[in-house]
Image (spheres, helix red, strand yellow):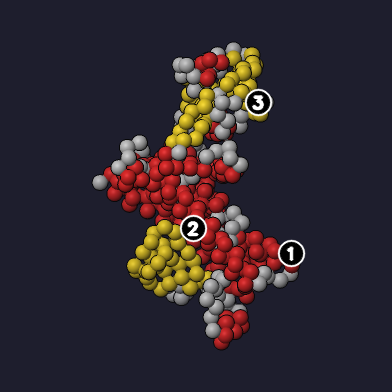
Amino acid sequence: MHALSNVIIGLLVFGVVVFVHEFGHFMAARWRGVPVDVFSIGFGPALCAWPDRYGTRWQLSLLPLGGYVKLHGAGVEENPPPPDEAARDAADPTSYQNQPLLTRVVVTVMGPAFNFLFAILLFILLYSLYGRPEIKPDIAMVAPQSAAAQAGLQKGDHLLSIDGRRILSVPDFQAEVAAHPGAHVVLGIARDGHDLDVPVTLQSVEEKGVAGKAHATGRLGIGFAVVRAKPMPFWKAIPAGIEETWHMTCQVVQTLWQMLTGQRNPDQLSGTIGIINMSGQAAHYGLAALLFFIAMLSANLGLLNLFPVPMLDGGHLLFYTIEGVRGRPISQRAQGYAFQAGLVLVLALFLFSNYNDLSRLGAFSWLTGHKG
């Protein structure tokens, strides 16, 4: 029953974030006078559908793993329409492909923009209701026999830098440590009013990844002080929400870069299954945890859609940039090839990330009868 509730909550959370993204495209299209043929939550056959007075078909589809807005005359056709239909579309002034470049850019960018805005609004609500928990770079606990203990770090030490680089936040510091197993680093700390440089050899800890494959991660062996703030006044929650969304976005970029450069194992990447499972778990910790997770998911979705990959919003923006420089759009044939390459890349990422999720959930061990 617990697993079923996780799935239901996860699908609802995922659906809300997808709806916000597609609603951004929808509202921008309506604003710029572009007809919207379909607004779908989910893919595949429609389970239920209804038209609105503007001619848009709203629908809930069978596979609740995303969604889309079908703009009138938009898209690269894999099977081109008959010549008479193609000529009719080319002459249609309301067709999306015939819109000015600025209109197409605005409609495309507003999907991710709505995701970022939604994340900011949720953080504002979260901080207004519950306050902003803060993890300070102050050592609250030193694990026995850990790298920190061997280096002489103490409870109450305030972390300032690592190898001369200022520590901007605890998550940044944790990511830096995790990415350098066994490394010799110098930590700058403040203790009793004095600044000290403490050399530390980070521990290298083996962690299981995809299909049981182990990888090394760095560990220091300390706990941080957590300060739980009181609910913020609304005017203070606004800049705090913007700051949190920005920091979270930068953290995702850093993590993905570390995966691409081999500093972090890509088996930490989560897919749809993991998102759904984490949504349910967050809900069981209460409303504050759920709001935080939804905000994080919305910001992540907005960022990932801006990557310059065909099929994603960032891919379309790349095409529009090239069109603006050249003075004419890329050919339909070239766009078609790019679309196919982007589809392969997105499907590969989807399969890989969900394979990670299933591996973490023990699905393959269960199938093979292996006990990890």
Above or below for 309 versus 217: below
Q: Is residue 134 left or right of residue 279?
A: right
Q: What element carries label 1?
A: helix
Residue type pointed to by label 2? Leu
Q: Position of residue 120 (x, y in %)?
A: 52, 47
Residue at the spot x=38%, y=72% of the render? 50
- Residue 325 circle label: 1
Q: Quadrant of the C terminus?
A: top left
Q: Position of residue 163 (x, y in %)?
A: 65, 25
Whole-number angstrom distance, CA of label 1 to CA of label 3: 43 Å
Closer to the chain start, of discs 1 and 3, is: 3
Q: In this view, does 256 lie to the left or right of 55?
A: right
Q: In which quarter of the image is residue 44?
A: bottom left
Residue receiving disc 2: 347
Above or below for 139 versus 46: above
- Residue 163 circle label: 3
Above or below for 200 versus 165: above
Above or below for 53 versus 228: below
